Image (tube, rainbow, N blue to C red):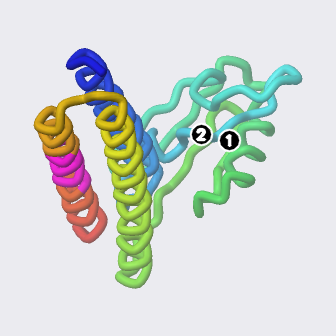
Amino acid sequence: MTEQDVKNLLADTKAQMSKAMEHFEFELSKIRTGRASSGMLDGIEVNAYGAMTPLFQVGNISTPDARSITIQPWDASVLPEIEKAILKANIGITPQNDGKIIRLNIPSMTEERRKDLVKSTKAEAEKCRVSIRTIRKDSNEKVKKFLKDGLPEDAAKSAETDIQNITNDYSAKIEKHLEVKEKEIMTV
């Protein structure tokens, strides 16, 4: 085993943790904060022209103010399909179709709903923490395998320390994202 193998392992560990973090950020973007955001519609697919198409590809999504989102399709014939897709996505908002655009009015949230959303946010953070710990465990097992295959013990200890430092960095990022999102949700 060479130093290059260890460097590759550390780079791979960092890349995997980065992907876990990206997924966490994506999941957080879907959680409502009481303010209108086009990110609330990410992941919604519309049956347009016989194929499932992401909502943002069938029309212009905008937030004219903090409490509403408008969707103006490129082709008015897909309005009913957009409406169906939003209802099916179960995001807690009923679309209003005026024949040209779809308007989504974001209701203000109750204190109880805010607390539920904070719980959801914490659950997503915990899923990300578990992913990060799993990646750390897998990387440490690879270091142990390298040790058996001839990697010097001091290099193995150094690699495990580096893996732990990477894990700590990503854990801190999770906490920071969680703190920001909780503050967003609880702000009236």
18 horizontally vs 38: left or right:
left
Which residue shows up at 72% across the image and 38% down it?
82
- Above or below for 129 versus 173: below
Residue 17 image position (x, y, % from top left): 34, 39
**Chain part drawn in magenta:** 164-174
Amino acid of disc 2: Gly
Query: In terms of image quadrants, where is residue 165?
Result: top left
Q: Which mark is residue 16?
A: none
Residue 19 is one of the magenta-drawn residues: no
Per the image, the residue denoted by label 2 is 43
Which residue is tagged 1? 98
Which three-letter amino acid code belongs to the residue tagged 1? Asp
Tell me which secondary structure the magenta stretch mostly adopts.
Answer: helix
Along the line of sight, the residue nearer the viewer: 100 or 30: 30
On screen, 162 above or below 96?
above
Residue at x-position 36% and y-position 68%: 122
Find numbered disc 1 in the image and state the secondary structure of the residue it sits on: loop
